[in-house]
Image (cartoon, helix red, strand yellow):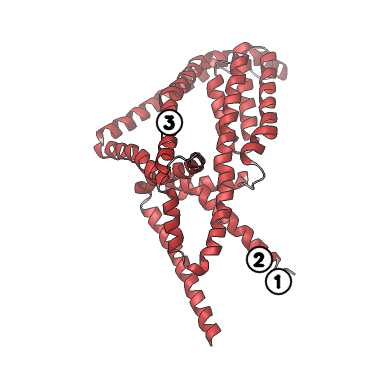
Amino acid sequence: MASAETKLISDMDKLLIALAIVGGGWLIYQLSAVLTPFFISALLAYLGDPLVKRLEKHKLSRTVAVTIVFAMFLLVASLTLFVLMPLLGAQLSEFLLRFPEYLGHVQQMLEPWLAMAGFSDNLLDAASIRETLGSYWSELGSVATGIFGYVSRSGMLIFQWLINLLLVPVLTFYLLRDWALILERIKAVIPPRYQARVIGLSQECDTVLSSFLRGQLMVMLALAIIYCIGLALIGLELALLLGVIAGVVSFVPYLGLVVGILLAGLAAFFQFQEWLPVLMVFVVFGVAQAVEAMILTPRFVGGRIGLHPVAVIFAVLAGGQLFGFVGVLLALPCAAVVMVLARRLYRRYTSSHIYN
């Protein structure tokens, strides 16, 4: 009788937990627009907490350590906004201005081959392609102007954007300062009989998340710097733009390598009209891959099991489709939890009498 009553209570607990998860998901969906700055701040606090702990080991107070890390975040954000973004915009504008010239080079290069293959000389008409692209760019410009006009006329949108811009640094500072206290409060809410299981689950999720987020972000940054320096040494005009693109997409293994070689190789050939710079592009990316395999990945990611690239792509796309930008921020933490739960279920299944 007692065992049946205990089983009923356990089933009720599971039902309440399931209802809480469903209700929390529904509430997040309804408040996604409001919760965006909170989730951005929580992500920044999660990334910065290990740095704060390292500073605390040097006998600094939590507030002083948080202030130092917060100042580092502000410095990186300011450099990105006021230095990197204008440089990337200038290189993109230069590329768009030179694009008709590149099209002319492609037409001159391919015309003999097309003639030998029996194709018409008008198959690649650079003038018509330039005209078509020009019309598309003008339409895009008119659409962008209309959107900007709507946003500028909507005072509420501007007010909400400014509020979010001010909230993110404030929330990040307080979340960083009280991160350990928040975790303790969450732990205190968990029933004692579930604490060991939940803490073990959260530690596994943290291992997966840290291996991807913290480790992979450092790898992406290092690769972007290597790509930019290497392409600049070749003399490529779009070195900064292409290096940043290749570094950003390198969160999926080999995607940054393929995209970077393709874009940088084409840019090198269009700019120099020779094959030697293209070969040098291959050398730059080959050296970067060797550095990543031998130094960067063992140093920052190590032997920890991260998220599979397919899981990362699916999680980000699914989160964005369901919850918008908040879904993108929640995608990786949720994917980490799902992966840890799937591993635990697999271990229980392989040790059960059904499998054996």
Contact flag, marks 3 and 1 (Cβ < 8 Å): no
* Residue 199 shows up from this direction: yes
Foreground residue among 90 and 274? 90
Q: In which quarter of the image is residue 141?
A: top left
Q: Which residue is at 61% across, 25% downward?
A: 226
Label 3 residue SS: helix
Q: Mark 2 highlights which residue?
A: 348
Observer-side mark, 2 or 1, equals 2
Residue at mark 3 to residue at mark 2: CA–CA distance: 45 Å
Q: Which of 225 and 234 is in front in this view?
A: 225
Residue at 56% over, 63% down: 197
Asked if residue 274 lies left or right of residue 19, the reply is right
Rendered image: mark on residue 297: none
In the image, which disc is placed on residue 354?
1
Query: Quick check: 166 above or below 14?
Result: above
**Distance from the alpha carbon under mark 3 to that under mark 1:** 54 Å
Q: Which mark is residue 77?
A: 3
For the C terminus, the quadrant is bottom right
Picture coordinates of residue 144, whole percent (x, y)? 37, 29
Outermost residue to the bottom:
1
Spatial CA span between label 2 and label 1: 10 Å
Q: Do the residues labelled 2 and 1 touch (CB within 8 Å)?
A: no
Amino acid type, residue under disc 1 in the picture: Ile
Tell me which residue sits at (42%, 40%) in the image.
Answer: 66
- State whether residue 176 is above or below residue 85: below
User: Does label 3 or label 1 sit earlier along the sequence?
Assistant: 3
